[in-house]
Amino acid sequence: MADDDLAQVVDVVSTAVVPVNADSFLLESAPVDDVVQAMETHHELCRSLLTRDDYQSVGSKQFIKKSGWRKLAVAYGVSCEMLSQEIDRDDGLICRAQVVVRATAPNGRFNDGIGVCSAEERGFSKPEHDIPATAFTRAQNRACSDLFGLGEVSAEEIGSEGAWSDGPSHATIGGARVPTPPAKPPAPSTDATKAQVKYLLDLCVKANLSAEQLASDRYRLPVDRLNKVQIGALISALKDGTA
């Protein structure tokens, strides 16, 4: 090809107008006014449907609990199904669970949520049930939250460390102003007493058993992190000869 011909080809290629496919743009699914009205309706629904018992305070923030997400799912006709569940075990005991849940709206729109729970988070009294159930709840809450377009973190994702407390006069959940729940009295302490721990250690010495090993086998926790119920269960097992 001659140099003059090549120059013409290059000139044509460089000046050609390439049409853009409109499908490549992310467009609103409805008129803007309708979308705004739908969001305002959702916020009003939150204010009217959810009560203070459907929120948990962590510091000065409010998080919707499982009961709140279920109410919203029923209100919108959303159905949920578990797509997958992965269970990890250590020495035969469940130590971690991961669950994927799909939330589907009546119009066919859906969103998948992932929930994970580990035995390292806290001492579960019934890990075989509690760990997978907590992972499922978190996945379901997340799927519903994202489907509603909120992206809110649920109370179950925060964990059990948060306590009810006095906060601002109002909090914002998904853009909706909701009353802050009144402060609740602190729950009775569940910490094991020194007398309980000493009694457990004495029984283990008499039975020629390791208290730390017993605690690890049953609860995957060291003795100093067991609560009074767990310590009591070990004491009962030692006295009954079933430890």
Image (spheres, rainbow, N blue to C red):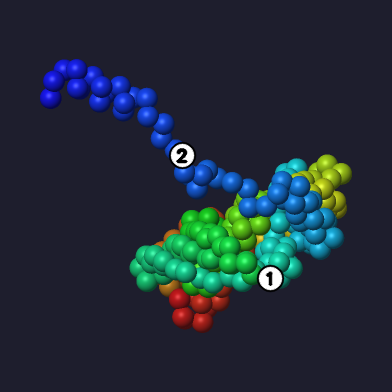
Quadrant where the image shows the N terminus: top left
User: Going from the N terminus, do you reach mark 2 or mark 1 first?
Assistant: 2
- Residue 229: give x, y in percent of width and height: 61, 68
Mark 1 surroundings within 10 Å by alpha-carbon count, few (fewer than 14), some (14 through 19), many (20 or more): few
Front residue of this view, candidates 19 and 65: 19
**Is residue 84 at least partly visible in the picture?**
yes
Q: Read off the residue under disc 2.
A: 20
Label number found at residue 77: 1
Q: Image point 30% across, 22% down: which residue? A: 11
Q: Image point 31% across, 26% down: which residue? A: 12
Relative placement, left or right, of 205 versus 122 is left
- Residue 39: give x, y in percent of width and height: 74, 51
- Residue 58: give x, y in percent of width and height: 71, 48
Kindly indicate the quadrant of the structure image that contains residue 157: bottom right
Front residue of this view, candidates 18 and 98: 18
Q: Image point 25% across, 22% down: which residue? A: 8
Foreground tag (2 vs 1):
2
Label number found at residue 170: none
Q: Secondary structure at mark 1?
A: loop
Label 2 sits on what residue type? Answer: Val
Front residue of this view, candidates 27 and 218: 27
Q: Secondary structure at mark 2?
A: loop
Q: Gap between marks 2 and 1, in whole Å?
A: 38 Å
Label 1 sits on what residue type? Answer: Gly
Mark 2 surroundings within 10 Å by alpha-carbon count, few (fewer than 14), some (14 through 19), many (20 or more): few
Q: Image point 79% across, 55% down: which residue? A: 41
**Is residue 125 at least partly visible in the picture?**
no
- Residue 161: give x, y in percent of width and height: 64, 52
Relative placement, left or right, of 55 versus 216 is right
Quadrant where the image shows the C terminus: bottom left
